[in-house]
Structures are given as structure tokens and as C-alpha cells.
């Protein structure tokens, strides 16, 4: 039976997560509509931390440069307890990691993603609310309502709920959202100060009482602008939502998370906290916005059902410790979008889209548990070495070992199937007169087969991968230092500095690594054969299966 679809994917929610999902879908030629009930972008610097792993994904899209020009670097954190300076935390990553930590107000992140999406002829449909949906084996029927009250029914192949902590998609899908709320309330403010603390460093100042308990806290994250910070602190009793007639946010749907309505902090409220806790005497000015907010920790029991999925705050909410939330949501969106794009093209394994839950829900569980632990016990609750801690906070250790889409991990050194494919420098080519990075080869591509040390068999393996995937796997050959690339075969590059061989722990035998669209290793074969390669590709592709 033929089905007529008004669009391929409806994305509910025009925040960073929904925009990332839509941008990646549109970049891959998938029709989609993005609906958001808000009439305009909110001018709030809610989520501000941009992790290195998120920048790597935006690099794959060709978006990283725009973000880097708008953001400010995050070099580390200055910590104070009862006015006494504590050891400084410097955010240092291994030299092969291409991006550092950054800060950017959420409204700027949304503006950049919105402009990128517009390149593909798609924009956010504002003042448009998703009111219900139903699904069957072939697609999803979505009911939308505009600000005028006009209702529209849209038939789509998939629905993605990026509609926040109070997600209608999650509720109607019947997903459990287990967890609870923290009793504390906080206030946020976006201000300028006149201290002379080093730029690019966050500030965390605490007061501990005689029992060693934290009873006052100030956290400041640098923003673009002159000595501008987003500050968070405990809310004074007179601004507490708990004592007001309208009550806290959980009164509507049981989820106490996000900005509260009602009274908002003024400059004097923020100044009072600075007077108590600032490491230097300072005066706050130029208040851009402020709010009271609550924090909960919850996660869904599954990330989707059938043709309907949830991502970001619709799937997981938790303390903002370590700037993990928005970045985790963006990576949810990326993981789902490339799979939906391939599934819509057809010729894929029937369980491809369902692997989203298998890969991303364990990540969400770990992030929720860790951020709650750090919020209640401090980062020292996880006694790992500094390097591991930094890589984890940068989200560079997120991986999918054991996923149905990747081969089993093997014994031995080097990144394994399911791990992030590390970047490296020092690749040379015939024509380019400058060294390339591995991520330059991966940019704006889907699956990429990296063949190391065996240019002679390049054609055979490249043809096998292309034939089985119906043209959806590109091949690049990387040769040891001193080799002469053959321009008659697949694109070839020389590992002049030896970084690729070192970082991937490659020996003398030829090897093949299949890198997925999201930059994770799907297979590691040594020595590679066409039979092994197609056996792996069958986890994702199913030639001739249609849509």
C-alpha cells in the first residue's frame, strides 16, 4: 500500500537539540519540519558550556568555525572556600584533540544553528504547537495547532520530540520519567563585573558552615563580552517560588526543572551574593536577564517507541554540573539523525533506528548518575586520574562498545569498535601543500573506510564497501611515512608524522577501520578482507531491502 507523506520527519522543539537534529537531517537531504510553540527565541543564557566532543560533531557538519568565532574559550576554574583560594583547575586536553572547551549563551547557539538550517531552506515554524500524534507501522500522524487556533494534520515517517523537560511527546508516548527534584532553588543572572580575575576562567566560591556543609554558593561562567558572566547562586527566601501562590513548576506536571515564572532577581539580589562570596570586591552592572530555577534528575525508561523518539531534556534532566546536559542532548540528536536519514533512504537494517535507544540511553543514565553524584558529593566523589576526568567531562570517552551496530571489541591496544575515532595531524596528499588532519578527511561525509598500509588492495575493499552499502561508504587510504601514494586508486594520504599509526596502535599488518557518520569506529579489521567488511556493514545496511 502506498503512503503519502507531507514530510519525512517532524521535529518538535526548536532549541539546540531540535535544531541539531533538523540540520543534520536536512544536510543529508531529508525533508523535515521543525515546530516550536514559542513565538520567538528566548534571550536567556541557560546552557552555556560547549564541550569539545560537540565541536567535533559540528566540525563534521561544517559548522565549527562559526561557533568558534562567536564563543569564548574556557581555560579552567578558580575555586574559593570561605574566601580562601583552592587549587586552580586547568582544562587541558591531549594535543591530538582538535578543540578545547568553550562558552556560548544558549540563544547564540540557537541563532547559529537556526542560520545553518536556513541554508537548506528550512526554518522553525514558530507559534506552532504539537497537540497530539498517532503512529502505525508505516508512519506518524501529527496534529499541529498554530497561534491563530488553526489545526493541521501532518503525515510523517518519524517524529522526534526535542520539546524539553515537560515534553508532550514523552507524555503521550507513555514513557516513564523516573527521578525526583532537588529541594534547593537557585537564581541565574547575566551581568558584567569589574574584577580583574583572569579571563576565560569560571569562578566557584563557596561558604561552608562550622559543620563543613555548603550553605552559600556562587558559580560564574564567562560569556562573550566585557567581563560578562552568567552567575548562579542560591535564591533568597523572598524570591522563592515555593512560598508563592502559583507555586513551583512541578505543580503542572510533576517535573520541577527549569526556569520559574513570577518574581525575578534584580541587580541588588545578585550584588548581595557577590558582596558575600566574590573573591574580590566587585560591582555588578548591565543585568541582561535573570530568573529563578529548579533542578531535577530524571531519565526515561526508553528513548523511543516505534517511529517516535525523544532526545535532550525530553529524555533526561539532571544538575548542570560540568555542562553535560545540552551537549548530551545534541549528541542524542546527531546519533538519531544519521540513522533516520539512512533509514529513510532505504536499504538499511530494519533495527537501525531502534539502535538509538541501545546506544544513547546508557549514556543518559551515566550522565544523570554522575552529575547527581557531583552535585551532592563534589567532583571528588569519582577518584579518577586528572586526565581521565578531563576527557570524561569533555565527553570524549562516550562510546558504544556492545552496540548492535559495532563489531565486538578486540584484545589489544588502540581504539576499538564503539570508541570515538581520535583525530590526528600530519597527513599529506599529492596536491595539498599543507598537512591535513584526519578530521579534514571525515568532514561532510557519512561512513568512511580508512585503509592503512595496503594501497594495493584498496580498490577491492573500496568496491566491496561501496557495492554493499549502495554507494554510501567512502574510502580513504592512509599509507606509512615514506610511501608514495598511487593516484589511480582510492584517495590516498601519507602518515608523514606517524601520528595515525601511533594513535590507532597500528602495527606492520594492513588494517581497515570503518568510521561511522558520528565519528565512532564501527569495525577494526587486521588484516582486512572483503568478507569481514561486508559482514560488518550488514549491521547497518541491507542491500535491496527498499524503504
Image (spheres, rainbow, N blue to C red):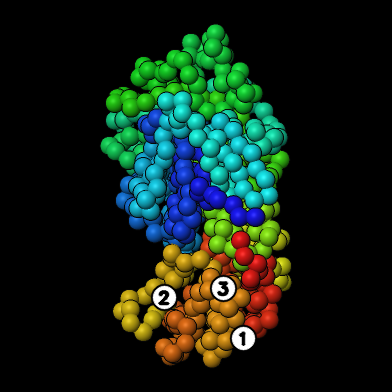
What residue does disc 2 label?
Answer: 426
- Rounded to the nearest angstrom, the CA distance separating label 3 from label 1 is 28 Å
Image quadrant in which the N terminus is located? bottom right
Residue at x 54%, y 12% (from the top left corner): 246
- Cβ–Cβ below 8 Å for labels 3 and 2? no
Residue at x 29%, y 26% (from the top left corner): 286
Residue at x 59%, y 63% (from the top left corner): 346
Q: Nearer the viewer, residue 54 or 139?
A: 139
Q: Tag 1 or tag 3, which sits nearer the N-term? A: 3
Q: Residue furthest top?
A: 245
The image quadrant of residue 349 is bottom right
Judged left or right of residue 450, residue 546 is right
Q: Is residue 79 above or below residue 402?
A: above
Judged left or right of residue 211, residue 89 is left
Q: What secondary structure is found at the residue carrying circle 1? A: loop
Residue 410 image point, x, y percent: 71, 71
Residue 211 image point, x, y percent: 63, 23
Q: Nearer the viewer, residue 490 or 265?
A: 490
Q: Nearer the viewer, residue 225 or 24?
A: 24
Q: Tag 2 or tag 3, which sits nearer the N-term? A: 2
Residue 82 image point, x, y percent: 49, 27
Name the mark nearer the viewer: 3 or 2.
3
Viewer can see residue 543: yes
Image quadrant in which the C terminus is located? bottom right
What residue does disc 1 label?
Answer: 509
Judged left or right of residue 367, residue 145 is left
Q: What secondary structure is found at the residue carrying circle 3? A: loop
Residue 91 image point, x, y percent: 46, 50
Q: What secondary structure is found at the residue carrying circle 2? A: loop
Name the mark nearer the viewer: 3 or 1.
3
Amino acid at each position: 500500500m502506498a503512503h503519502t507523506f507531507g514530510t519525512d520527519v517532524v521535529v518538535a522543539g526548536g532549541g539546540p537539540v531540535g535544531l541539531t537534529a533538523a540540520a543534520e537531517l536536512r544536510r543529508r537531504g531529508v525533508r523535515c519540519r521543525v515546530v516550536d510553540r514559542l513565538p520567538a527565541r528566548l534571550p536567556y543564557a541557560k546552557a552555556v558550556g560547549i564541550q569539545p566532543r560537540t565541536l567535533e560533531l559540528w566540525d563534521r557538519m561544517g559548522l565549527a568555525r562559526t561557533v568558534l568565532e562567536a564563543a569564548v574559550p574556557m581555560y579552567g576554574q578558580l575555586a574559593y572556600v570561605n574566601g580562601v583560594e583552592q587549587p586552580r583547575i586547568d582544562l587541558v586536553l591531549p594535543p591530538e584533540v582538535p578543540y578545547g572547551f568553550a562558552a556560548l549563551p544558549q540563544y547564540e547557539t540557537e541563532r547559529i544553528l537556526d542560520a545553518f538550517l536556513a541554508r537548506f531552506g528550512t526554518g522553525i515554524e514558530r507559534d506552532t504547537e504539537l497537540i497530539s500524534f498517532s503512529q502505525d507501522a508505516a508512519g506518524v500522524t501529527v496534529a499541529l495547532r498554530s497561534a491563530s487556533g488553526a489545526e493541521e494534520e501532518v503525515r510523517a515517517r518519524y517524529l522526534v520530540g526535542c520539546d524539553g523537560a515537560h515534553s508532550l511527546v514523552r507524555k503521550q508516548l507513555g514513557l516513564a520519567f523516573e527521578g525526583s527534584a532537588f529541594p534547593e532553588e537557585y537564581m541565574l543572572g547575566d551581568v558584567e563585573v569589574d574584577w580583574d580575575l583572569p579571563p576565560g576562567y569560571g569562578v566557584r566560591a563557596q561558604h561552608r558552615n562550622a559543620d563543613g556543609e555548603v550553605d552559600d554558593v556562587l558559580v560564574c561562567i564567562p560569556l562573550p563580552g566585557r567581563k560578562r558572566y552568567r552567575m548562579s547562586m542560591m535564591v533568597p527566601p523572598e524570591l522563592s517560588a515555593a512560598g508563592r501562590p502559583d507555586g513551583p513548576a512541578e505543580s503542572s506536571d510533576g517535573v520541577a526543572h527549569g526556569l520559574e515564572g513570577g518574581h525575578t532577581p534584580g541587580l541588588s539580589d545578585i550584588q548581595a551574593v557577590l558582596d558575600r562570596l566574590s573573591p574580590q570586591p566587585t560591582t555588578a552592572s548591565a543585568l541582561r536577564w535573570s530568573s529563578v530555577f529548579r533542578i531535577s534528575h530524571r531519565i526515561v525508561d526508553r528513548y523511543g517507541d516505534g517511529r517516535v523518539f525523544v532526545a535532550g531534556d525530553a529524555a533526561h534532566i539532571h544538575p548542570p554540573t560540568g555542562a553535560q546536559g545540552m551537549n548530551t542532548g545534541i549528541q542524542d540528536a546527531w546519533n538519531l539523525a544519521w540513522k533516520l536519514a539512512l533509514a529513510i533512504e532505504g536499504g538499511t537494517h530494519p533495527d537501525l533506528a531502534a539502535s538509538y535507544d541501545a546506544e544513547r540511553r546508557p549514556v543518559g543514565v551515566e550522565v544523570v548518575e554522575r552529575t547527581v553524584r557531583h552535585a551532592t558529593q563534589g567532583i571528588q566523589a569519582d577518584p579518577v586520574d586528572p586526565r581521565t576526568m578531563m576527557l570524561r567531562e569533555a565527553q570524549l570517552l562516550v562510546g558504544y562498545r556492545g552496540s548492535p551496530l559495532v563489531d565486538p571489541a578486540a584484545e589489544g591496544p588502540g581504539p576499538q569498535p564503539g570508541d570515538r575515532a581520535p583525530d590526528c595531524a600530519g597527513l599529506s596528499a599529492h596536491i595539498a601543500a599543507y598537512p591535513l588532519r584526519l578530521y579534514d578527511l571525515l568532514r561532510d561525509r557519512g561512513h568512511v573506510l580508512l585503509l592503512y598500509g595496503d594501497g594495493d588492495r584498496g580498490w577491492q575493499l573500496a568496491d566491496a564497501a561501496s557495492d554493499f552499502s549502495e554507494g554510501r561508504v567512502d574510502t580513504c587510504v592512509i599509507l606509512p611515512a615514506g610511501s608514495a601514494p598511487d593516484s589511480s586508486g582510492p584517495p590516498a594520504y601519507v602518515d608523514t608524522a606517524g601520528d595515525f599509526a601511533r594513535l590507532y596502535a597500528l602495527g606492520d599488518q594492513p588494517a581497515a577501520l570503518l568510521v561511522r557518520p558520528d565519528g565512532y569506529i564501527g569495525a577494526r579489521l587486521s588484516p582486512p578482507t572483503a568478507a569481514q567488511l561486508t559482514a560488518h556493514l550488514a549491521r547497518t545496511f541491507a542491500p535491496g531491502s527498499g524503504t
